[in-house]
Every structure is written in structure tokens, then in C-alpha cells.
Amino acid sequence: MNQTASNYKFIQDLVNYNFYAEAQATWNVNDLIVDLEKIKKEYSRVGEGLSKFHKQYLLMVLVGKQLPDMVAELEDITSVESLRTKLSNDKRKKGIHFCLQKLLKQEIGNPQDIIFHLFNSKYRKQPQPPNFEKERSLLIRIPDDVSAKQLLEIENKVRAITGCPYIRVMEIRIGSIILVFKGSQFACEQMESLHKQGLLSKMLGVPIIDVEIIPSQVNLTQWFENILTSGWQAANELLTPSQLELVRSAEIKAGKLINLQAYMLSHPVVLLVNLERENDNYPEVEITLRVYPTGDDVYLPPNLKLIVLSENEVFQEVTARSEDKIIQCQLEGELGEEFTVQLVVGEAVISEDFVI
């Protein structure tokens, strides 16, 4: 069987499973299962892939099903206890939870853990706003006893309330759970207003501890004080060891996973910002912008553009060529200066505003 036919059969098998279409609306299901299959085959003694049970269980997790809801759908499972036993035995046999731990580099103890960690990954679909729409970020803090199903419901309710089809959770932080949404400025202001009126808790069906609109600009000076902007992560959480070799240890650095969607395809990349200055009193900051693919063995999308705008004029522009694994540019700025970075593939444009 050639590779094209094999891929077609793989997708058809998934389509025939319950909950595939529902999961595919929110997650990059095919990419997730392909990557899990690679891990399963690598650690399996006989090179076997994911079983039908693994795939069905994962699809139900992705749509927020709880263990009691899964019993009737899974073959040879008669109770929640028998499902727990199978998952426990399966983990020792390098099963689905083992593969997810390897893929996400996080401990997986239950289905809710899977949702929490996948929300912050490239497997989460990110609807693109119209190019003319100004995006803002919104922080909603809720108690830590909500289920994965409730998290998915909260996101859908926020979309329904605001009428903004692309507002989505970009990041989940654990403690009291902090949901970081990104959507139109009007939608974020609407959610903040509803909270101030005391209406939001009832509309979302969970207690709301706090709602806050996050400043739209990334303040780079705060990075020197070890205050990272929401949505940005340490470089070693996003890059592979070989990619990190290009980054000098003395630099202040942080990255952001950005998912560009163009031509019906998803293009996850990492934007890394590196900062250097001579000392705390030195007014000029040297800034290096780098864009990486997610992983060692893949290339950047051809014709991906890294654009730096200053006062709405193009200051620098770099375009990825075929088989480029990194593009970068450097600039210098002084305290208070502002600039915008754009990543562009086809009609997909993602912008980040910065102030030094």
C-alpha cells in the first residue's frame, strides 16, 4: 500500500469512530494521533501502533466525556472500575497515557490532565480573526474544581455570549484555574463588563473569581525583572535541544507558540524573542527575533514572512525559503520605543505588539 493510500485509510478509520467529527472541530486530531502512533511504535517491542480502544478513548477525552460516559461506548468495558483497570494496565504496557506523557512532557494521571495540557499545545485549533480585527487577551480566574468538560463548555458559552466565533482559550494555568482567552477587543470588553455587573458567573455556570483584560503590548523591559508576559514561555519549554544550541545562555529569552492556518493547513511555529543589554542603566536593548518550526525534522512553511513594523512602516522583512529551519532578524531599540512583529503565511497574519 503506497503512502497516500495508507494515509487515506488511516483517516477513514478515524472518521468511522464515534465523536471524531466533534473532536475534529476543536482539535487537530489527525496530527495528534499520528504523533502518538510514532511514540507507540517506538516504545512497543513489536512496533505496534495505537489500538481501536486507544483512539476511541482519546476522541472521547477530546470532547470532554467523563469516565462514566465512556463505558457504553467502549468494547469490553462494563463499568468505570473496569475502565480504570484497563487504563492502569495499559499504562504499564506503554499505552495511551504513556504516549501522551512522552508527547506532552507532562504527567498524565486522568482524562482531565490530558485536556489541561493539550489546551496549551499545537494540537488545539486556533480560529483566525479577520485581518482588520484588533485582538485582545482576557484573563478569567475560576475555582480549581471544574472538570475538563466544563472548560470546553465555558469556551463555547463565551463564544455564544460575545458573538465572536474565534475567541478561544490560549493558555490554562493551574492553581485556581486561570483561563487566558484571546479574541476581539469588543468581546473581551463585553466579558469584563458582564463580570462587573455580576452577571458572568450565572451565564457561564461557574463561580468567577476575577476577570481582567491583559494589556495588548508585550512589555520587554519587564522580562529583565523575570516578569514574563502572559502567553509567553521559557525557551526550553518550546524548543528542542538542537534548536536551543543557537540561543546564548546569557540572553533574556522567551517564546510563544503560534499556529498559522492557511490553505486548509495548520502551521505551528515558535516565535522566540531574545534580549541583551550591557547593564541595567544602559538605554539600548539588542533584540533578536527567531522563528522555528515545532520540532527538529520539519521545515518552516515556504514563504513564511517575519515582518517588523515601526510606526506602521516595514522596518525589516525576512522570508523563509524551501527547507529553512529558522529565520531571524535583529534590531536595537531604546526604552519606550514600540514595534510590531507579524508572521504571515498566505492570508494568515498574526501580530504581536511590543514596547521596550
Image (cartoon, grey):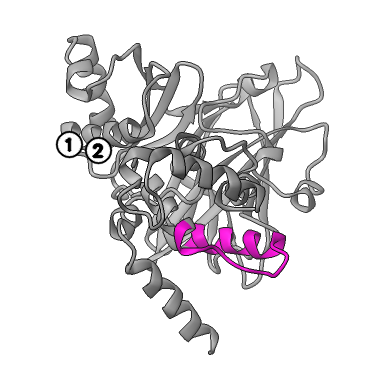
Identify the residue at image location x=38%, y=58%. Answer: 75
On the question of residue 247 being in view, the answer is: yes
**x and y percent of residue 228 in the render?**
60, 24
Identify the residue at image location x=52%, y=36%. Answer: 339
Quadrant where the image shows the C terminus: top right
- The amino acid type found where label 1 is placed reads Ala
Identify the residue at image location x=37%, y=74%. Answer: 12
Provide the major secondary structure of the magenta segment: helix
**x and y percent of residue 272 in the render?**
64, 42
Is residue 40 shown left or right of residue 134? Answer: right
Q: Residues within 10 Å of mark 1 (few under 14, many from 20)?
A: few
* CA gap, disc 1 and disc 2: 6 Å
**Along the line of sight, the residue nearer the viewer: 35 or 50:** 50
Identify the residue at image location x=39%, y=57%. Answer: 348
Is residue 289 shown left or right of residue 16? Answer: right
Vertical position of residue 146 compared to residue 275: above or below = above
Vertical position of residue 50 compared to residue 282: above or below = below
- The amino acid type found where label 2 is placed reads Asn
Query: SS at mark 2?
Result: helix
On the question of residue 345 being in view, the answer is: no
Write down the residue under mark 1: 160
Whether the magenta-drawn stretch holds residue 33 is answered as: yes
**Along the line of sight, the residue nearer the viewer: 264 or 76:** 76
**x and y percent of residue 252 in the render?**
73, 30
**Along the line of sight, the residue nearer the viewer: 324 or 161:** 161
Query: SS at mark 1?
Result: helix
Vertical position of residue 2 compared to residue 234: above or below = below
Q: Residues within 10 Å of mark 2 (few under 14, many from 20)?
A: some
Write down the residue under mark 2: 156
Region in magenta: 31-53
Q: Which mark is residue 129?
A: none
